[in-house]
C-alpha cells in the first residue's frame, strides 16, 4: 500500500509538470 501511495504521488507530480509545460505556450 505504501509503495502504491508513493507511485500515485509521483504520478500526480509528473502529470502536473507535463500540464504546466503544455500550458506554457498558451500564456
Image (cartoon, rainbow, N blue to C red):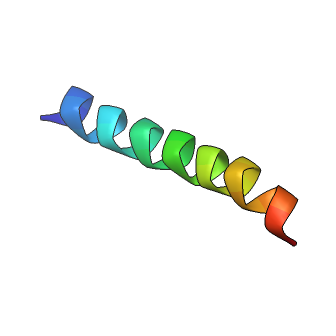
Q: Is residue 11 left or right of residue 20?
A: left
Determine the residue located farthest toward the bottom in the rendered image. 27
Q: Residue at x 82, y 59 (%)?
A: 24
Horizontal relation, residue 8 to residue 2: left or right: right
Residue at the limit of the structure toward the top, as seen here:
3
Quarter of the C terminus within the rendering: bottom right
Determine the residue positioned at 44% across, 49% down: 12
Residue at 45% x, 37% y: name it: 10
Q: Residue 3 at x, y = what percent?
A: 24, 27
Residue 1 x/y as whole percent:
12, 35
Q: Residue furthest left?
A: 1
Q: Residue at x 26, y 41 (%)?
A: 5
Q: Quadrant of residue 18?
A: top right
Please give left or right for residue 4 compared with residue 11 in the image: left
| Rendered position, 15 above or below 7 | below
Tell whether 12 sits left or right of 3. Answer: right
Q: How many marks?
A: 0
Residue 17, given in percent of the width and then of the height, sits at 65, 47
Front-lying residue, 8 or 21: 21
The spot of residue 19 in percent (x, y) is: 61, 54
Amino acid at each position: 500500500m505504501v509503495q502504491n501511495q508513493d507511485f500515485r504521488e509521483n504520478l500526480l507530480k509528473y502529470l502536473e509538470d507535463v500540464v504546466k509545460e503544455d500550458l506554457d505556450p498558451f500564456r
